[in-house]
Image: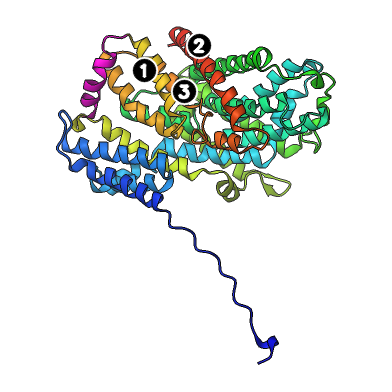
Amino acid sequence: MSTADVKPAAATTPAAPFDWKYYLHTAICLLIMFGFGQLPPFAPLTPLGMNLVGIFLGLLYGWVFIDIVWPSLAGLLALMLIGGMKPVVLLNKSFGDPIVLMMFFIFVFCATINYYGLSKFISLWFITRKFVAGRPWVFTYTFLGSIFILGGLTSASPAALIGWSILYGICDVCGYKKGEGYPTMMIFGVVFAAQVGMSLIPFKQAALTVFSAYETMSGFGIDYAKYMLIALVCCAVCSLLFIIIGKYVFKPDMSKLLALNADQLDTDGSLSLNKVQKIILGFLFALVALLLLPNFLPAQFFVTRFLKSIGNTGICIFLVTIMCCIKVDGKPLMRFKAMVDSGVAWGIVLLLAAVQPLSKAMSAPESGITSFLMMVVEPIFGGGSPLFFAIVIGLVATSLTQVMNNGAVGVALMPVIFSYCKAMNVQPELPLIMVVMGVHLAFLTPAASASAALLHGNEWSDTKSIWKTVPCVLLLSQLAITVIVVLMGGLLF
């Protein structure tokens, strides 16, 4: 046989090592979910309550150590098998829940904003205003403000990536190099602004998850307009605190920003909106306006009656329907399937689909969970004021969110808030807002949030600089948020 007849051996891909930790966590998750309810009930918990607590704890374990998707699906199956819910009822209360559908359509809407390049336009528009020229700290404050707004309109991760791309352009134009004080400070500053900015909009992602979990338990819904006012002030003050910390603690060299011509940052014409982008921007304003208008218009006004008749979910569907119907230059304004494929975070949708029916079941008197939780928290908070409870629960949320999914943290604390407020006959707004704001301060560890993981993986940053910057900003932000929520919450609610 000639050498030409000899065929080379097929290249083999080395087998991936057996991931025993993943399967160990999986086994523990399922054991908690389906096995906890087999233990003797702890009075006043009923057998049904034990099963529901087991499902809840199993979900939390799975969300922390495994993933969001399949533990959420396993939780839905557990509710059918041991949670006392018939499949049709469960599906109506999970995937058929208005809040779950609203989250889905909000994702589709935000994907359209990103698709048409409006995210970058929003950031660039703010930092190219004339009043920031030659004023480095005003420029930096305005830059952070634009990322706050972008985080609220989209989500933290895309807002951070867009903010970094603009920051790299600033560094290139001004001559900043990797490792210098200003870019190192602002790499974190962008993530900080994007993450806290997500709290601005109460009808999307973590805020919606937390508020809807409480509303499902209690039937109580928070006033979105009042919440947004408080969140806006929190974001503005936190951004100002970051500037003060930067100016007097980190003291980066700002001289290179003095001669910055911000118009140079628009290298691809993002500031020039075309016809389609202007239409999409109009729909964005319409979405926010229509969701808030029922809080301001007279109750008997026909617009108010229409908006309340379809609800927040119906408003989202209404606008998405119009956007899919409209054609511009012969093409649909919104390509629905493409936006679903690119923009829907199915993990969050599934998490919410599992939380909604579980929250309602856990708050039912026949489970005994509310009575049990009150028995546990009464010795801790019974002698304290509702204000003390709100502050402590906010600190707990901020601490837990550094190692857990922020939505999961918020959901885990809702039964505690519900039990306390019901037993003490106090309004839940302050602790609710403290928890929602607290879970957005998630940027200390890589496990805190997706944007925090991006921060720890950014080559312009390093672990030493993160641990030097983040704790100080975290503590001062928590203090500022506490003061603002207490003062404004006392006036508005």
Does the rendering let one see residue 139? Answer: yes
Mark seen at residue 484: 2
- Does the segment drawn in magenta span residue 382? yes
Which mark identifies residue 438?
A: 3
Q: Secondary structure at mark 3?
A: helix
Residue 30, position in %: x, y? 30, 47
Closer-to-camera residue (144/357): 144
Residue 318 versus residue 258: which sits nearer the camera? 258
Instruction: Give the mark nearest the N terminus, 2 or 3.
Output: 3
Q: Mark 2 and mark 1: span between their CA atoms?
A: 16 Å
Pair 2/3: label in front:
3
Task: Label 2, secondary structure: give it.
Answer: helix
Whole-angstrom CA distance, mark 2 to mark 3, is 13 Å
Alpha carbon separation for disc pair 3 and 1: 15 Å
* Residue drawn at (80%, 32%) of the image: 172
Residue closer to the observer: 63 or 10? 10
Could you say which is closer to the camera, residue 334 or residue 424? 424
What is the span of residues highlighted in magenta in the rendered image? 369-384
- Crowd band around label 1 with a 10 angstrom C-alpha radius: few (<14), some (14–19), many (20+): many
Measured from the top left, where is residue 238 in percent x and y? 58, 17
Above or below for 473 versus 385: below
